[in-house]
Each structure stands twice: as C-alpha cells, then as structure tokens.
C-alpha cells in the first residue's frame, strides 16, 4: 500500500529481512503466528512433579503452577558450529539458543555466513541471572586456556561475540543489559549502527531461559505475576502475567540496500527510541506516563510518522490494571486526541512474560501482522477494564482476528517494551514498499536447486521440509527458490541437487518420485571430468545453460567441488525468499558441575 518502487527511500529506514523465533508453543515464527491468529494460549499449567523448585514453594497456597515452557531450552546442535560437546555443555542455555537463532535468521534472510563479505553487527540481550543459576564456574586461581574457554562459553557478555565467532563473521558485538526492554534496545542500537555505516547488516534480538525450568511463581497482591496463571491484557479482572522463556532475532539492513540486493522484506523499522524514567518514576519499576509518552512520540518523530497513520499498537500489556492504565494513558498522550483509529493488543495473553525477549514476541507479532496484512486477537480479554476509558483514546481493543485495512492507506505498527528500573523503548514498524513489477518467469528453463547437510538424515529432513513448504506456498517462483538455496545456505558435506524445469518437478524430485536423472546425491552422484569445467576464483563454472551442462555441474558439486554460484545466477533478477532453515538435531546438554 506504499508508493511505487521507484520512490526515494528515507535514509533512516531499516528493513527487516530475516526472523527467527522460539517461544512457548512454537518452534518457528510461522507456528507462533498460527497460534496468535487462532487465539491459542501457550502458557502451561504444570504437574507438581514437573516443577523444579523447593518443595515448600510448591505446597504454598500462593504458588501458581503456570509457566511459558520452552521445550528446547536445554538442547543444542553443536556440530553445525564445530563446537565440542564439552564446550556445548559449558555454554549457558541462552548462549546456545541465541547462536542457533542467529543462524536461522541469516538463512531466513537468504544469506550464507561463509559468503558474507561485509561487517555484520550482533546485538543481543539476555538475563545475567541465568548464567549464575545454570552453574557458576569456580573462582579459578589459574586463568589458563581451559579457564578462559569456559568463561567465554558461560559469560552473559560473550553471547553476541560467540555468535560472530562460531558463524565465521566479523563486525560489532554488543550484549545489552536493559532488563525486560532488552530486545528493543538491541534493535535500537543495531539500527543506529547501520545508519551510521558502522555495519552492513545486523542481527538483533534476545534470549531468555528462566531457571529452574519449568517453574511457576508465587503470587503476591499488587505485583506483576498473575493470581491464576493467565495474563489478561486490558481486562478488568487481570492480576498480572506468567513467566516464560524464548528467543527472538531479526536480520536488519538499510532499506535502500535491501531493495537493491533483492532481499525479502518483512517490514521496515521507521523509527526507534529509548529512554529511562530516572527519578521521575511514580514508583521504581513502574511506567512513568510522561516519560513513556515521550519515548513513543520520539520514535514516531524520528521516523517522520504521524500518529494517525499508526493503526496497530502492540502494548507491553502486563495484564494488571494499574500498569495497563499507566501505559494506555502514556500512549494516548503520545498519539493525541484522535479516537478509534488504532487497534491495541497484547501478546502476553498468549505466551506470558518473556523477560528480555518479551518485546521480541510483540515485535514478531507486529512483523507477521504486517507481512500477512492481518490483526491477531488479544486473548483472555473478556471484560474490558472501564477505567482505561478506551472510547476517549485513539485505541480499540482487538477482540477478534481480522483483516488489516487501515484508514490512512498504509499499515504501520507501534510496539512498546517496558523494563523494570525505568527502561522505556518503542519501535515504529511499516509494511514493506511495493515490489517492482517483474517479467514472468521463463517457462521450461532448466534450473539447478541444491541442498546440503552434515549427514544424510538431516539432508533427508531438509528435503521433506522444503517439499512441504513449496506445496504450502504456490506463489513462490522457481528462479527465486533456486537463487535462495544456492546462495543463501552454507555448503556442507552431504549434498543433494536437482536440475528441474518447474516447481512441480522440484517437488517431485524432493519426494523421490521424479524420473531418474533429475536429482543426484552424495552417495550416488555420477563422476564427471572436473578439468573440463571453466574456473573462476570462486570455483568451477557451468559450461552451458542447457540441462546437461547443469546436470554435470550438479554432479561435480555433489561430489565435493566448489561451484561459483554467483556466476550461475549472474544477470538474473531473482529475489531472495524465505525457505525452511537448517534442521538442527538438538541433543541435551546440561552442566551440573565443573
């Protein structure tokens, strides 16, 4: 719904070109979005035997056995990153989750870390307490190699530098400490670095694992944790929220460069702002309306966005009347006096309070809403709190999932995150620019599609996942699919390739139902005369564009040759598109002593 693709993009616009999420009830952003649009609550109510806390707590009448459980909190696939099992066990859960999520974000954006030549900044927030609860290392007398290695695996500070190191990248690495506003602060710093030209791309996010996991919480009157384990944003009967864990990362790039590089763009960060209440707080840890309002207004001003064009507001929404009232009051001051133009919602009703990653859950909700042009319902909202006085505000509670048709003609969302200690943060997101018209894809032209993995089992899982994805996404073009696979995935030892002329042939090849000769695998690839291929500095080059030349190139690649895929796709106008990411094979790693 934006202007034509020939427009001059605002120099302050930053594109979101990749995403990764794991949350209670969802291992992918697609599952997360499906849960939201279908109104599913992903907070679990635990049996006593499942809770890892002191027995006296469990039997307290005020103990609430509710938790947003992250089912992969203790698992990891170190082999993908060349990490030993000993090192994997030393790494904290948040270090491991963030590393896998950063990998998935790059793949979702269509980038292979081995082929990135620019600087990639990594900005992330975690919970420093998790490291101490996981298993604090001893106070070593020696600081030899083993002690240093262990401390780098364990330290909250090194979460972002570990991501750079183990993915083979260079750039900035900043680990953020901003309590529950950590995700937003990471995105804010990443955008600043990109706009200053300090980095070419950036990964920003947060990881939170509450330990012991899973566990409930003790209810205390007038505190932020829920009496019954349910979070009810804006509801008269709300008593707070439940605790949860998760990880979210996004891949960012200046918008003009993302368009020029033919990246898939989920949305645009138009503006971001952060501030702190300082001594002006009503009570330390609660929102201060004037300061939060200033933060929200500043983010809109930075992006050149007027409040009447922001038709979705994703609130911090703790589900506690006093905090919800403070936030709605603050947001109303920032938005001004227009009424009934902005949908308001709160994702904590679905997944609980994810601490430093809670803002990430809200941001992904908004990003997916922009991507799908749909507004997800706020669940557990059955009796709107009349003290919020919504009729006199710009906001209308989103009670049902609905198509997003803004009156202003453009879809924009504001996402607020508030952290204890007075931290305020706000992001203004906008739908991506209209894509340029493209010539229809050449019918019947042979194309090469490739997959690789560490072992044959993972390779087989990749084929199944890609087949299912293509069957569910009939609008994807074959040239975009092959371009994204060939240039956007790290090349590993076990390989599969197919030369196909249509999506249907690719799906058949992935299924193993294709005629012989379409696909080749590591174990059964025909031998070819490698010396017959032309070469560039980046590997062998196809000798022609017909099916036989591509089949020979596929066989050589499957047998271990390095192929110059840039040359293969030279002169094309193919776009990067989201495709299934690597099928990690997580195993449990848990440290009990040093």
Image: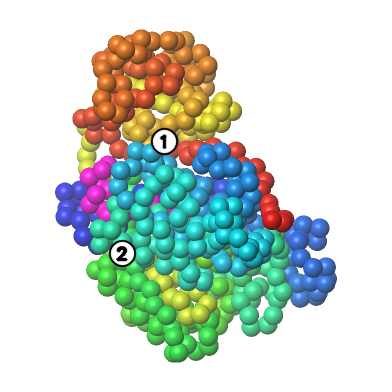
Q: Which mark is residue 489?
A: 1
* Observer-nearest of 211 and 245: 211
Rate crowding at label 2 as few (under 14), some (14 to 19) or many (20 or more) other CA atoms within 10 Å.
Answer: some
Residue appearing at x 51%, y 47% in the figure? 100
* Observer-nearest of 349 and 393: 349
Number of numbered markers: 2
Locate residue 442, reporting x and y percent.
26, 24
Residues drawn in magenta: 243-262
Residue appearing at x 53%, y 81% in the figure? 285
Rate crowding at label 1 as few (under 14), some (14 to 19) or many (20 or more) other CA atoms within 10 Å.
Answer: many
Horizontal arrangement in the rendering, residue 22 relative to residue 221 (left or right):
left
Residue 494 in sight in this render: yes
Locate residue 381, reporting x and y percent.
57, 68
Q: Is residue 471 magenta?
A: no
Spatial CA span between label 2 and label 1:
28 Å
Locate residue 318, reporting x and y percent.
55, 73
* Observer-nearest of 294 and 116: 116
Q: Which mark is residue 192?
A: 2
Residue appearing at x 21%, y 60% in the figure? 11
């Amino acid at each position: 719904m934006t202007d034509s693709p020939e427009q001059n993009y605002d120099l302050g616009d930053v594109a979101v070109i990749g995403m990764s999420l794991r949350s209670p009830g969802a291992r992918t952003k697609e599952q997360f979005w499906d849960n939201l649009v279908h109104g599913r609550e992903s907070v679990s109510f635990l049996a006593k035997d499942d809770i890892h806390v002191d027995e006296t707590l469990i039997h307290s009448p005020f103990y609430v056995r509710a938790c947003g459980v992250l089912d992969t909190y203790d698992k990891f696939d170190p082999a993908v990153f060349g990490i030993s099992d000993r090192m994997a066990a030393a790494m904290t859960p948040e270090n491991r989750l963030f590393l896998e999520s950063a990998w998935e974000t790059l793949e979702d954006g269509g980038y292979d870390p081995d082929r990135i030549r620019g600087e990639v900044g990594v900005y992330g927030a975690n919970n420093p307490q998790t490291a101490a609860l996981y298993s604090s290392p001893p106070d070593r007398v020696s600081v030899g190699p083993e002690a240093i290695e262990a401390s780098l695996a364990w330290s909250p500070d090194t979460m972002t530098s570990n991501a750079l190191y183990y993915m083979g990248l260079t750039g900035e690495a900043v680990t953020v400490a901003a309590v529950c506003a950590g995700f937003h602060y990471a995105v804010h710093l990443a955008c600043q670095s990109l706009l200053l030209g300090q980095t070419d791309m950036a990964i920003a996010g947060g990881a939170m694992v509450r330990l012991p996991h899973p566990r409930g919480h003790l209810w205390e009157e007038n505190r932020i944790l829920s009496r019954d384990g349910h979070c009810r944003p804006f509801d008269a009967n709300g008593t707070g929220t439940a605790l949860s864990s998760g990880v979210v990362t996004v891949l960012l790039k200046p918008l003009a460069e993302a368009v020029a590089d033919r990246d898939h763009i989920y949305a645009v960060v138009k503006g971001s702002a952060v501030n702190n209440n300082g001594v002006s707080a009503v009570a330390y840890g609660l929102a201060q309306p004037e300061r939060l309002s200033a933060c929200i207004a500043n983010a809109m001003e930075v992006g050149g966005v007027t409040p009447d064009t922001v038709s979705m507001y994703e609130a911090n929404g703790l589900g506690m009347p006093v905090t919800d009232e403070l936030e709605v009051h603050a947001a109303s001051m920032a938005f001004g006096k227009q009424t009934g133009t902005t949908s308001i919602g709160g994702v904590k009703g679905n997944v609980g309070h994810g601490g430093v990653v809670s803002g990430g859950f809200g941001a992904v909700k908004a990003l997916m809403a922009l991507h799908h042009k749909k507004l997800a319902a706020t669940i557990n909202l059955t009796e709107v709190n009349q003290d919020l006085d919504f009729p006199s505000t710009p906001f209308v509670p989103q009670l049902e999932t609905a198509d997003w048709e803004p009156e202003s003609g453009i879809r924009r969302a504001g996402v607020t995150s508030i952290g204890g200690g007075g931290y305020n943060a706000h992001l203004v997101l906008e739908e991506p620019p209209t894509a340029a018209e493209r010539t229809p894809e050449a019918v019947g032209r042979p194309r090469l599609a490739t997959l690789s993995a560490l072992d044959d089992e993972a390779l087989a899982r990749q084929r199944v996942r890609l087949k299912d994805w293509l069957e569910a996404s009939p609008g994807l073009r074959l040239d975009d699919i092959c371009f994204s696979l060939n240039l956007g995935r790290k090349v590993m030892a076990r390989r599969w390739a197919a030369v196909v002329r249509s999506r249907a042939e690719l799906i058949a090849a992935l299924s193993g139902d294709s005629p012989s000769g379409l696909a080749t695998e590591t174990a059964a690839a025909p031998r070819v005369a490698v010396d017959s291929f032309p070469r560039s500095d980046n590997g062998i080059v196809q000798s022609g564009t017909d099916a036989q030349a591509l089949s020979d190139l596929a066989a050589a690649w499957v047998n271990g040759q390095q192929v110059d895929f840039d040359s293969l796709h030279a002169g094309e106008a193919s776009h990067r598109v989201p495709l299934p990411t690597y099928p990690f094979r997580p195993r449990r790693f848990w440290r009990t002593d040093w």
